[in-house]
Image (cartoon, helix red, strand yellow):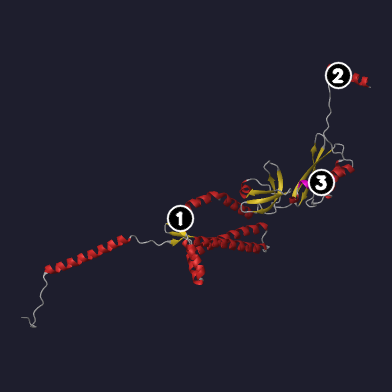
Amino acid sequence: MSALGENPPPETPAAETGEGVDGAVAEADGALKDAGDALASAGPAPQATEDVVAGAEALKGVVAEKSGTVAGIIEQLDNFGFTIDETRISAWSILVVIMVVLGVIVFARIFSKMAHSALGRMTRFDASQRLLAEKIATIAVWAFAILIGIDMLGIDLTALAVFSGAFGLAIGFGLQKTFGNLLAGIILLMDKSIKPGDVISVADTAGNEGFGQIRKIGIRAISVVTRDQTEYLIPNENLMINQVVNWSYSSREVRVKAPVGVSYGSDLDLVTKLLYQAVADTPRVLDNPKPRVNLMGFGNSSVDFELRFWILDPEEGLSNIRSDVFMRIWQLFKEHDVEIPFPQRDLNLRHNEQFDQLVAAIGQRVDKNS
């Protein structure tokens, strides 16, 4: 009998406690097994696909809030598509890409023209500096527009990782000459060795050399127009690695040479005076630097002079100004009886028996005919 006068609770036997725990564990195992069988019968859970153009999905949501009709059309376009791995490509995504690309092109063209007009109003730049600034501005505008387009589309570039290696290699090989010519053109404009308006020597495929004026410097080539209005497109790289004769590189003044020969019986002082008068009477010839008449030597049949004079407009041609000077020299020489010699040869025949017989036979025939 206890102090409180109550009987103590009966103790649970150890065997009964162990049996209860084992039963609970068995029930839990059964529940897990049933859940696993249910999952196995249900199959794998479907994986969520992601649109390759994230911006298209966002634009679809915005349009759906504004117009239900347009949202229905977009939904129909979005249903036409296919899935690669976990990437969804639909007709709506392609349409959005096309619209953004067109927008980028329009944006870049408009801002490029605005930049060109703004640079054209800057009188502090010369022709080459203005052209260089326009090219840099064009590249910057296009790069900025492309980045904006990619950001608007929200393209997941990892979806194109499969093609990026081969595509980049093809671009590298295919456009290496284009980028080389672009860099060569920029370098030529920076060092001002070649600029629009310069007159350079141009050789055609037959090797005939002519003079042409640079009309413009493009991304790939420069445009050179000759006097006969033939336009040559010369790659920029060729001007970097080949020798180029620039007649107006540091100055537009060009010296022209005109060789003249007179007979040995001529008054050389009079000839010199007439040569100076010829260039003075010819348009396009500069008074300063002054023309120069040089006695070059005594030839086989003539006294050789060389008339040297300067012009300021080589793009107008060199052969034509030389022709004008020669024509005026001819007129002055005729007025003052100055002879322009031409090669003359004396034929000396040695006498021998056969030759004397031939001469006698010819003489007899002449006498009979007379």
Give the main secondary structure, helix, strand or loop, of the magenta stretch: helix
Residue 209 higher or lower than 183, as above or below:
above
Q: Where is residue 100, by image quadrant?
A: bottom right
- At x 82%, y 38%, the residue is 303
- Amino acid type of the residue tagged 2 in the rendering: Leu
- Is the residue marked by circle 1 packed among few (<14), some (14-19), or many (20+) residues within 10 Å? few
Dot 2 corresponds to which residue? Answer: 358
Mark before the other along the chain sequence, 2 or 1: 1
Residue 314 higher or lower than 130, as above or below:
above
Report whether residue 118 is seen. yes
- At x 25%, y 62%, the residue is 33
Front-most of 42 and 31? Answer: 42
Residue 231 magenta: no
- Amino acid type of the residue tagged 3 in the rendering: Val
Q: CA distance from mark 2 to mark 1?
A: 100 Å
Dot 1 corresponds to which residue? Answer: 161
Q: CA distance from mark 1 to mark 3?
A: 70 Å
Q: Which residues are magenta?
A: 318-328
Secondary structure at numbered mark 1: helix
Dot 3 corresponds to which residue? Answer: 325
